[in-house]
Image: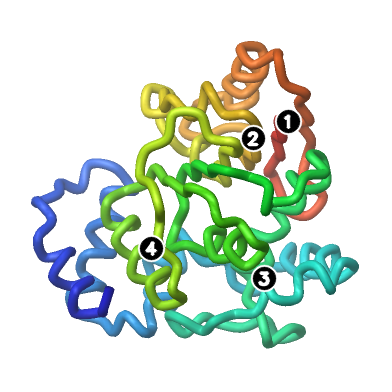
Amino acid sequence: MTADELRVAFAALPPLAAVTTWDQHRLALREHVKTSDAEDFLNWSTVSATMFVGEAPYIKKEWQSLSSRADFWENALQEPGIGNPPRLSYAPHTSGNLVHQAYHLQQWLDWSERDIRDIDSIYEVGAGYGTMALILHRLGFDGDYAVHDFVEVNLLRQWYLSQVDIESKKQTMEKPDLLIAACSLSEMHPSSRRLSPVETATSYLIVFQPRWNKVNNHSYFDELMDRRSDLFWAKYYSESYPNHWYLVGI
C-alpha cells in the first residue's frame, strides 16, 4: 500500500461522529492522513497520544531487562524507521515502542517457555500501527494473524506493515493459539469485550489497568480466569510499567 492509497482508503470511510474520546482520536487520525506526511506519522499528535511510547522512564528498565538477552532480541528491536520514530537516546538503533512491546511479549515467553515459531495463530486486540506484528515476524512467527481494532487504525497498520513487507493472512479467528491484548481489552466497554477469541484462546498475554472509566478490570479478568479454569494463570503487577498488571494464561 502506498501513501496515496492510504489517503484514498481514508477518504472513502463513512462519516464519524465524535461521541467518545477514541472517536475524537479517530477523527484526528483521518485529518492527519488527509493533510500530513505519512512518512512522519509517528510524530502526529494523536499517534503520540495513543500508540507510540517515547523515552518514558519505565522504558529504560524494560530495555535493561531485554538487554540481558541481547542475542535473542537484537534483530527484533532494530527500528526500521518507518514513520520517523523518535529513537532512544541510550539505544539509538531502537525506539521506546519496540522495547515496550517486546517486553510485553517477553512475559508470555517466560511463562510459556514456548518458541513463537511454533505458534500457528495469533489474535491481537488493539494492535496499533503494527509494532507487535513486526516483532513477531522478526522472531519467526509465520502463522495466521488477525486483529480487532478501529478501521482507521487497521488501515494505518496495513500501510505500515506493507512498508516492511508483512501482510496479515487472516482477518477473523475462532480459537487462536495466542491472544494478545496490551492495554486494549481493559480500555473497552464490557459489552465490547465479548469477542469469541477472548473466550476461546489457547493462551493469553494481557496487559491491563486496575480501573478504566469506573470498570473494575481486576474483577473482569478474574471472571475470565474462572471461566477458563482449564489454563494456568499468572496475574502480577508490572515491575516497570506503573499502575499496570500482567495476566498470562497458558
Q: Of helix, strand and loop, which one carries label 1?
A: loop
Q: Amino acid at mark 4?
A: Arg
The residue beneath circle 4 is: 157
Mark 3 vs mark 4: give the one in front: 3
Which numbered disc flags the more N-terminal residue, 3 or 1?
A: 3
Is the N terminus in the top left, top right, bottom left or bottom right quadrant?
Answer: bottom left
Of residues 123 and 94, the one nearer the viewer is 123
Q: Amino acid at mark 2?
A: Tyr
Q: Name the mark on residue 204.
A: 2
Q: Position of residue 127 (x, y in %)?
A: 47, 52
Which numbered disc flags the more N-terminal residue, 3 or 4?
A: 3
Residue at 76% x, 84% y: name it.
90
Q: Amino acid at mark 1?
A: Ile
The answer to whether the residue labelled 3 contacts the one labelled 4, judged by CB atoms less than 8 Å apart, is: no
Residue at 54% x, 65% y: name it.
134
Q: Position of residue 46 (x, y in %)?
A: 37, 65
The residue beneath circle 1 is: 250
Does residue 181 sit above or below 36 in this rendering? above
**Residue most toward the right?**
68
Is the C terminus in the top left, top right, bottom left or bottom right quadrant?
Answer: top right
The residues bearing labels 1 and 4 have C-alpha atoms spaced at a distance of 28 Å
Mark 1 vs mark 4: give the one in front: 1
